[in-house]
Amino acid sequence: MVKMNILQVFDFFSLSHGGGTVDILYHLSRSLSSRGHNVVLYTSDFKLDKDYIQSLEGVKVYPFHSRINMAGLHVMPGIIAASRKSIKDFDVIHMHCFRSFQNIVLHHYATKFNIPYIVDAHGSAPRITVGRKGPMFYFKWLYDVLFGYIILRDAAGLVAETQVGAAEYVELGARPEAITVIHPPINSGEFAHLPSPGKFRQKYSIAEKKVVMFLGRINWIKGMDFLVDSFALLASQREDIILVIVGTDDGYKRVLDKRIDDLGIRDKVIYTGFLGGKDKLSALVDADVLVQPSIYEQAARPSLEAILCDTPVIVSKNTGAGEDIREMDAGYLVDHGDVNGMKDAILHIFANLDEVRAKTQRGREYIKKNLSLDAQMDRYEQLYREVIEKNKAGQS
């Protein structure tokens, strides 16, 4: 095996704020290092989780100071000098996320010194925003006109998590032949020894309740208004249910709270904030169903984690998450906004436990066989080698 010098890049490195993308980056970097590669991570100091970094054995992490957070773009001038000095030391660069300050800098020096790079948008490519064409839409459009299109054009490879993600690249003008679909790896070993059932329920005094759970950032794009409306309809028919929202507020909780109050279900909703590690697993183990009701979602990571905890899932149909769950036949699909359809799907799960267990077990086996860390790492390594060799051939 030929050792590679690999640069991984993401805006920030905190599991509570970066969620699934940071988890993917962590395990990807750690696994590459364990396979003998030299791995370096460039990030910012925004919400930096130092303990999390210290557990990332074998990986050098450089957190540059974020001087300005401009509509989600973390401007870190220190990355400019570091890139100018060190970028020639890398064989390949893996950019996580699409629109970022560091991608502008790294694109400049990567093309100057002929270092191949890969863009991995993790669902950040679409311009979809609140109000469809509000200020953020035009901010993203301006970024694309000035930097984004050329970053995609010059990329040695583009990684999509599903075919939905691949279509998003093409919509922005990317070459289809540059796109590789690699589902984010799942470290199924973390789910080998699950917490005993009942701990989460006991903590929140909901032992006798049917628990409908959401896991993820509290953001409008996650479709949480749809979930709350569906839950309110369900609560009008059953007294024994509770909605548990697990995740960090991403600017939408205030809006969601108003909707909850208007629907009169405040006493039936619990916010836990961010949960990680065993606390997250305990929550998933004790849930009766996990709902991923997104307007848009490239992949089904929260649902896959729930399945590995033997918890049934419902996801929005026309999303990358829906694509994942449909392919595995591991859960239930509803059209986003179909409040009655969501309510009926939840009731169906409550009433058909044998069918539900069969779907969940099928999903567990599929994940372990096809989406494990080891299996997906082979694909990442192969992609890195391909773009490196293609780049070398282009120079000769």
Image (cartoon, grey):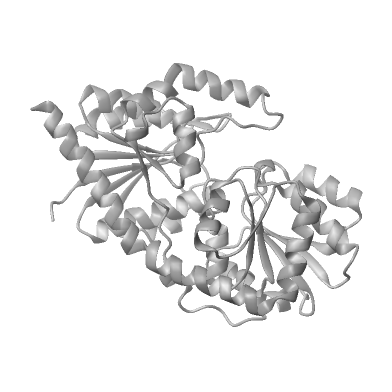
Q: Is residue 254 left or right of residue 307?
A: right
Percent position of residue 40, x then y: 29, 46
- Residue pushed farthest left? 396
The answer to whether 34 appears left or right of 282 in the picture is: left
Kindly tell me whether residue 11 is visible in this rendering.
Answer: no
- Vertical arrangement, residue 18 with respect to residue 236, above or below: above
- Looking at the picture, how far across and down is residue 173, in whole percent? 43, 24
- Is 181 rendered above or below residue 133? below
**Residue 8 location (% of width, % of height):** 33, 43
Work out whether 253 lies above or below 84. Answer: below
- Residue drawn at x 13%, y 33% is 392
Residue 154: in sight, yes or no? Answer: yes
Frontmost residue, 225 versus 13? 225
Observer-nearest residue: 69 or 320? 320
Query: Picture quarter containing residue 160?
Result: top left
Q: Which quarter of the image is occupied by the C terminus?
A: top left
Q: Quadrant of residue 43?
A: top left
Residue in view at x 23 percent, y 30 percent: 85
The N terminus - image quarter: bottom left
- For the point 49% across and 28% down, the residue is 171
Tally of numbered tags: 0
